[in-house]
């Protein structure tokens, strides 16, 4: 973690939301799904976002999938599912097939599990990489010193911190 998946997804969502009939950014999907009735809670949140209504009534995951299908089929939506770790979560939220969604809809899924999307062959996968040493030093220095590189007095300490963070911008 910490490479910036959520940050990038958030930027994409905010820059593109206006182009769709509705949208929803679901943060911490993994964490929410582990709560009692967590999947239903996630489904309810999506429905509330795209229908602009609060407290959608859903009694089961199956009912939620049916309601999501009805709500999303005729709308172009952008949906961000952040921190997904199980295919079952995707099946409960977006169904085991993409027929839930209007052709112009976009779904972005952030995950640490590279093989999670194998059952969705029509999706594109973008793998974020850590920053190289030069870029890491520049970003760290901008935040720590307000300039692109540290002064000679701070260079050794800054290099040790950069190396310790291993190219992860949020470390």
Image (cartoon, helix red, strand yellow):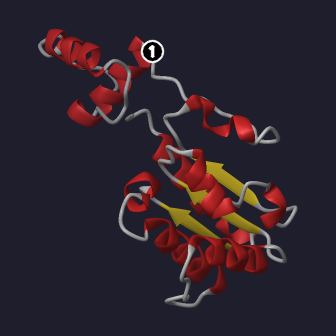
Left or right side of 62 for 82: left
Q: Tell me where residue 163 appears, x and y as whole percent.
A: 27, 13
Residue 24 sits in quarter: bottom right
79 relative to 134, above or below: below
Whether residue 95 can be seen here: yes
Left or right side of 33 for 43: right
Q: Residue sitting at 74 percent across and 80 percent down?
A: 71
Which residue is identified by label 1? Answer: 132
Q: Tell me where residue 12 appears, x and y as whole percent.
A: 61, 53
Residue nearest the viewer, comparing 90 with 106: 90
Q: Residue furthest right?
A: 103
Q: Tell me where residue 108 appears, x and y as whole percent.
A: 64, 51
Residue 4 sits in quarter: top left
Q: Secondary structure at mark 1?
A: loop
Identify the image quadrant of the N terminus.
Answer: top left
Left or right side of 19 for 46: left
Identify the image quadrant of the C terminus.
Answer: top left
Residue nearest the viewer, comparing 47 with 77: 47
Q: Tell me where residue 121 appears, x and y as whole percent.
A: 80, 38
171 relative to 53, above or below: above
Q: Residue sitting at 75 percent across and 42 percent down?
A: 120
Residue 146 sits in quarter: top left
Residue nearest the viewer, comparing 66 with 49: 66
Q: Residue sitting at 76 percent across and 73 percent down?
A: 69
Whether residue 21 can be seen here: no
Q: Residue sitting at 38 percent across and 58 percent down?
A: 34
Q: Residues within 10 Å of mark 1 (few under 14, many from 20)?
A: few
């Amino acid at each position: 973690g910490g490479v910036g998946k959520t940050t990038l997804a958030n930027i994409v969502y905010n820059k593109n939301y206006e182009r769709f009939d509705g949208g929803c950014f679901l943060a911490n999907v993994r964490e929410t799904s582990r709560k009692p009735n967590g999947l239903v809670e996630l489904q309810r949140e999506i429905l509330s976002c795209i229908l602009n209504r609060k407290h959608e009534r859903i009694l089961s995951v199956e009912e939620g999938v049916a309601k999501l299908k009805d709500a999303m089929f005729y709308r172009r939506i952008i949906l961000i599912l952040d921190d997904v770790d199980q295919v079952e979560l995707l099946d409960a939220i977006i169904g085991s097939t993409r027929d839930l969604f209007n052709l112009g809809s976009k779904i972005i899924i952030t995950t640490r599990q590279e093989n999670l999307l194998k059952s969705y062959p029509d999706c594109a996968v973008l793998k974020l990489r850590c920053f190289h040493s030069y870029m890491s030093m520049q970003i760290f220095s901008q935040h720590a010193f307000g300039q692109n590189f540290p002064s000679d007095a701070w260079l050794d300490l800054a290099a040790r911190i950069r190396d310790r963070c291993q190219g992860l911008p949020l470390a």
